[in-house]
C-alpha cells in the first residue's frame, strides 16, 4: 500500500495467472495453452508485416481482421469488436455494459477474473451456486438486475451448457446484457454466435489463445449487435487507439485463413481428451465431462494439493485452486498424445509410491 495510490489502485485485488516457469523440460499443463504450434501461415504473415510496415501505426479500427472474423461467422464487420486478448475485451465489456450499483450475476465456480473486474469497476455481483454435479441452473440467471456473464464451457469445470439453455438466459434478461465467454467453445458442440442476429442483448466473446494456439499474440474478439459493438468501441477509443499491433493483426488473419489446420488440431485435442479422461478414471479419478481443452478431476483419496506438489516436483505443472469448494480438484490441460504419455508415466509412479 502506498499513499500515492488512487482508491482504484488500493481496492483492486489483481488476478493471479497460472505460473509461467522459464525452465526447460517442464510439461506445462496448467494454463490451457494449445500444445500444437499455430498454422504455418501465421509466422509467414508476421514476418512479412515486420519487414514491410512495422514503422507505421496499425489501423485503429482493425477493419481487415474484423472482416475476416465476420466472414467466418456469417456476420457483418459491425457485429465484430477485436481486442488485446479476450481478457481486455471482457474488461471493456464490464465498463461498457455493467453499471456501478447494479448487481450482476455469474456462477460461484467460474473464471476468477470476473470478480476482479467487478471490484475494479465498482460493480456489485452475486455468485450463483452450481448444482452438485457442477452444472449451472439457467433459471438462477433470469432477471438479473445488472447483467450476466459466464463462460461456456465453464472454467475450470469444462462443463458445457446447451444452446437452448443459453438462449433461455438471454431471453429472460431482455433489458440487460448477457455475456457468454466462449474461450473454449471450439472444443465444444455449438457456439451462441448463431443467436447474435436475433438478440440485441447477447455478447459472445471468443479468443485466439486456446483453439488457435496464439496465446502469446493476444487476440480476442466479441460478437454482438452493432449497438453493443459501438459501446465497446467508445470505451476502447477512450483508452487506447491501438490495442492490437500490426503483428497480431497479421497473424490472427492468417490463422483464420487456414481452416483445415484449425479443424485438425482441434479434433486432435478432442480425441486426446477422451482418451485421457478414460485413463484418469482407470487411475481412480473422478473426471467431469469436459467439452474444453482441459479436464477437471478429483482423486478418490489423494489430496489435490499433494498431487499438484508432487507433480510439480516431477516437472509437470497442472492447476490447483486453493479455493472452496474446489480445493479437492485439479485442472489438467490436454497436451499432445506424447505429452499425455509422459504425464501418465509420472502420475503412475506417484500413485504407486502412495500405495
Ligand atoms: C483463457 C481465458 C480467457 C482469456 O483469454 P485471452 O484471450 O488469452 O485473454 C478468457 N476467459 C476464459 C474463461 C479463459 O479461460
Image (spheres, rainbow, N blue to C red):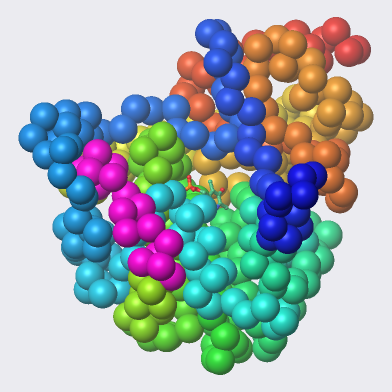
Of the pair 62 and 5, the residue shown nearer to us? 5
Is residue 180 covered in magenta?
A: no
Q: Position of residue 349 (x, y in %)?
A: 75, 8
Residue at position x 28%, y 45% in the image = 245
* In this rendering, position of residue 322 left or right of residue 35: right
Query: Residue most toward the front?
Result: 3
Q: Which quadrant does the C terminus fall into?
A: top right
Q: Quadrant of residue 251?
A: top left
Q: Looking at the image, is 245 positioned above or below residue 227?
A: above
Q: Which quadrant does the N terminus fall into?
A: top right
Is residue 126 visible from the viewing direction of this image?
A: yes
Is residue 238 covered in magenta?
A: yes
* In this rendering, position of residue 244 left or right of residue 41: right
Q: Position of residue 93 (x, y in %)?
A: 50, 68
Of the pair 37 and 270, the residue shown nearer to us? 37
Q: Quadrant of residue 285?
A: top right
Residue at position x 65%, y 82% in the image = 146
Q: Provide the residue span drawn in magenta.
A: 235-251
* In this rendering, position of residue 320 left or right of residue 240: right
Q: Looking at the image, is 306 positioned above or below residue 109?
A: above
Q: Looking at the image, is 84 positioned above or below residue 297?
A: below
Amino acid at each position: 500500500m502506498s499513499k500515492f495510490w488512487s482508491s482504484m489502485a488500493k481496492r483492486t485485488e489483481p488476478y493471479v495467472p497460472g505460473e509461467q516457469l522459464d525452465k526447460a523440460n517442464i510439461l506445462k499443463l496448467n494454463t490451457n495453452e494449445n500444445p500444437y504450434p499455430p498454422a504455418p501461415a501465421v509466422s509467414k504473415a508476421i514476418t512479412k508485416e515486420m519487414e514491410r510496415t512495422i514503422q507505421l501505426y496499425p489501423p485503429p479500427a482493425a477493419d481487415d481482421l474484423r472482416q475476416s472474423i465476420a466472414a467466418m461467422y456469417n456476420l457483418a464487420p459491425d457485429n465484430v469488436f477485436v481486442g488485446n486478448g479476450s481478457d481486455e475485451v471482457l474488461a471493456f465489456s464490464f465498463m461498457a455494459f455493467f453499471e456501478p450499483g447494479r448487481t450482476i450475476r455469474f456462477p460461484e465456480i467460474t473464471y476468477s477474473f470476473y470478480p476482479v473486474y467487478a471490484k475494479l469497476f465498482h460493480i456489485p455481483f452475486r455468485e450463483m451456486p452450481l448444482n452438485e454435479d457442477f452444472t449451472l441452473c439457467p433459471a438462477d440467471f433470469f432477471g438479473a438486475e445488472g447483467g450476466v456473464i459466464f463462460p461456456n464451457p465453464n472454467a475450470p469445470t469444462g462443463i458445457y451448457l446447451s444452446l437452448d439453455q443459453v438462449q433461455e438466459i438471454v431471453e429472460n434478461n431482455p433489458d440487460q446484457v448477457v455475456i457468454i465467454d466462449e474461450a473454449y467453445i471450439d472444443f465444444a458442440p455449438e457456439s451462441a454466435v448463431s443467436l447474435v442476429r436475433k438478440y440485441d442483448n447477447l455478447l459472445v466473446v471468443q479468443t485466439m489463445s486456446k483453439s488457435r494456439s496464439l496465446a502469446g499474440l493476444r487476440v480476442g474478439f466479441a460478437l454482438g449487435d452493432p449497438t453493443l459493438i459501438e459501446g465497446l468501441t467508445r470505451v476502447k477509443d477512450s483508452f487506447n487507439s491501438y490495442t492490437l499491433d500490426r503483428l497480431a493483426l497479421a497473424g490472427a488473419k492468417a490463422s483464420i485463413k487456414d481452416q483445415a489446420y484449425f479443424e485438425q488440431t482441434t479434433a486432435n485435442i478432442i480425441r486426446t481428451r477422451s482418451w485421457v479422461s478414460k485413463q484418469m478414471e482407470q487411475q481412480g479419478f473422478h473426471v467431469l465431462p469436459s467439452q474444453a481443452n482441459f479436464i477437471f478431476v478429483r482423486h478418490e483419496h489423494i489430496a489435490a494439493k499433494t498431487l499438484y506438489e508432487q507433480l510439480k516436483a516431477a516437472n509437470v505443472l497442472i492447476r490447483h485452486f486453493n479455493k472452496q469448494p474446489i480445493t479437492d480438484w485439479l485442472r489438467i490441460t490436454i497436451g499432445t498424445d506424447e505429452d499425455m504419455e509422459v504425464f501418465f508415466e509420472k502420475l503412475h509412479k506417484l500413485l504407486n509410491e502412495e500405495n
